[in-house]
Image (cartoon, rainbow, N blue to C red):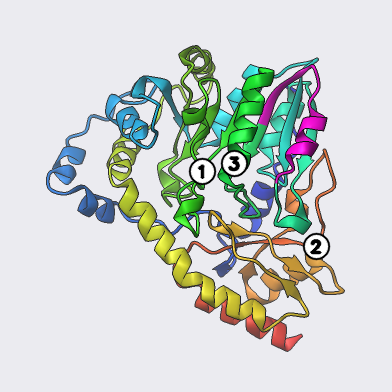
Amino acid sequence: MIPPRDFALEVYFSRWEFSARYHLTASDAQTMTIGELFDLAGEGSRSEFESLPLGYTSTWGTDPLREAVATTYERVGPEKVLCFTGAQEPLYWAMQEFLGSGDHAIVTVPNYQSMETIPLGTGAEVTGLLLDEHNGWALDLDLLRRAIRPTTRLIGVNFPNNPTGYVPDAATFRELVELCDERGIQLFCDEVYRGLELDPERTLPQAADLSERAISLNVMSKAYGLAGLRIGWLACRERSTLERLERRKHYTSICNSAPSEYLATIALRSAVAIKGRNRAIIKANLPAFSDFFARWPDLFDWEPPAGGCVCFPRYKGADGVESFCQELVEQAGVLLLPSSIYRSDLVEVPRDHFRVGVGRSDPAPALEAFDRFLESR
């Protein structure tokens, strides 16, 4: 691996995430307490948890956890699931497993930074496929086809997209999956926000359900709002793919925390209720965000996310989005992520956007502080 550049989002968060008064750019849905999880799980869960041995777990993940994960898919059994610590670890290893010098990859932009920096670190050539800002951040399949080379080994996508909230229609997504299968290209699909679509009819099938070769990435952090559990997974119907990745996991986490795997299991058994709760929070929040941005039409272009709990409004002020976000957090304590956080080494990302999170409960105090800041300028 070639050492990647600093992870811009985490560097920024290390400075501001826990010191800013208002975290208005959170990428996860509202979390729950352990007590609330136990209430969902019903009688016996607390005492079972208290008697849980604190030893090693299976590298693949406990059987109950993988069985619970498998229930979220249509065609993936528990033997086709490999658990990891969070989503970063499986992304890190998958990109290194499939790419190396002489290979070519295509990844959507803007993106979660490691979706491009890890492939670049393998020595592969990487093409950035810029989502269309002027068409709701849509995926252009014709542009994607033109970017494919004889050496293209992997296409990496993220739907619902972070930071834009874009969700392709089902026909476009199926066409993408079929294209990868026809060309023998590994499809790596980051699906961590699946289940938080504004319109449930927009929820896409999971890539691993549509294709035997495709890999689906998911995690308890985003749509479930349980980031502190640090439990993620890959699903792939091609078992040999997961077996190779399990060998790589031996060099990092080896296995997950037993308490975290237990809590993730009981959360997944209540997946419908948890995601329904989180969608309701987003739905209740959106009118407040819409009203806020409507009061400042000369400064912002805003559209709610089609899926997930983040979106990427445009800032139209003459001072520029970087200065604006810096002043906002320093003077008003309101944290946003300016577009520089999503700078790409592959293609120019629009420089006048910022990320907003709409999945946390009670955004009113943050929006009021934001409003006062704008009025005082």
In what element is the residue under mark 2? loop
Q: Residue furthest front?
A: 171
Where residue 265 appears, as percent x and y from the top left, is 30, 38
Residue 334 to residue 248: above or below? below
Q: Residues within 10 Å of mark 3 (few under 14, many from 20)?
A: few
Distance from disc 2 to disc 3, alpha carbons, whole Å, reads 31 Å
The span picked out in magenta is 139-155
Q: Residue visible at 40% across and 26% down?
A: 76
50 sits left or right of 128 in the view: left
**Which disc, if any, is residue 171?**
3
Q: Quadrant of the N terminus?
A: top right
The residue closer to the viewer here, 58 or 204, is 204
Q: Residue visible at 59% across and 47% down?
A: 169
Three-letter residue code for mark 3 = Ala
The residue closer to the viewer here, 197 or 179, is 179
Q: Which residue is mark 2?
A: 352
Q: Is residue 216 visible?
A: yes
Comes first in the chain, label 2 or label 3: 3
